[in-house]
Image (cartoon, grey):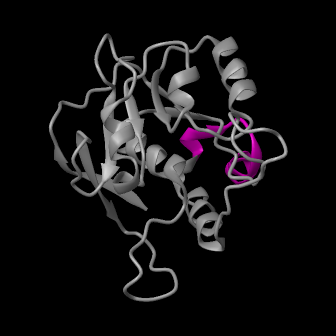
Amino acid sequence: MKVSIHESKVELKPENDTALITGDGRTFPEDMRKFLEMNIPHDTYCIGRSINQYPNRVMGWVNVDSTESKHWAEHLPLKNNGKIPIRHTMGSHEGFDVDWDILDEPLWNRKDDIRWRGSSALFAVLICLSLGYKKIYLAGCPMDKKGHWYWPETYEGPEWLDEDYQAWDEFAKQDEAKKVVSLSGYTKEVLSA
């Protein structure tokens, strides 16, 4: 499974060899703390609301659900040296800067089922690999049902499908998966196996 740029309105150029991808899993605050204590020079790509809590520069914002997040993408905080972070998605959608195509995506249940499987975190990992990062860390991307860091602890979700877990399992078999370290949850388990 890989991605390639279909169209980009901006130049994409990593500044470091390491990328940090932040997500909205309940583990995000603790994962972020652990990663920042490592003091590794890195570029940051945020998913969802984690951009609001990450304390430093954010180079990119990734969301696989572009049609549902257009307004959000257009109103991100100016965390990329005073500008909106570069916004990545699949498909050409207003409010985003980079449109990615999926290459070699497994077909799941039906021949015509081309819906993305995995998570926005897996999509962000594939973007970072395509951009040439040598090491990628996931913070707050556990792929569990323990809710988001900004919800009360009594709230559970999201509901992941078997195909979403299968997509991570398939990715973990690729050689490039060795470049990815998750700090918590199912993604840590599958990438460490």
Total marks shown come to 0
Q: Position of residue 193 (x, y in %)?
A: 74, 53
**Residue 32 visible within the image:** yes
**Residue 131 visible within the image:** no
Left or right: residue 12 compared with residue 1:
left
Residue 169 vs residue 6, the one in the foreground: 6
Left or right: residue 28 compared with residue 56:
right
**Residue at (28% x, 52% y) in the render:** 100
Q: Is residue 59 above or below residue 91?
A: above
Left or right: residue 44 compared with residue 142:
left
Residue 39 vs residue 58, the one in the foreground: 58
**Residue at (41% x, 41% y) in the render:** 62
Image quadrant assignment for residue 140: top right
Q: Is residue 87 above or below residue 44?
A: below
Quadrant of the frame with the N terminus: bottom left
The answer to whether residue 185 is magenta is yes
Q: Position of residue 123 (x, y in %)?
A: 45, 51
**Residue at (38% x, 75% y) in the render:** 114
Q: Position of residue 175 (x, y in %)?
A: 53, 53
Q: Position of residue 157 (x, y in %)?
A: 72, 55
Q: Is residue 174 above or below residue 109?
A: above
The answer to whether residue 119 is magenta is no
Q: Is residue 113 above or below residue 166?
A: below
Residue 131 vs residue 98, the one in the foreground: 98
Region of the chain picked out in magenta, as a range: 178-193
Furthest residue toward bottom? 110
Image quadrant assignment for residue 116: bottom left
Image quadrant assignment for residue 96: top left
**Residue at (50% x, 27% y) in the render:** 51
Q: Main secondary structure of the magenta part?
A: helix
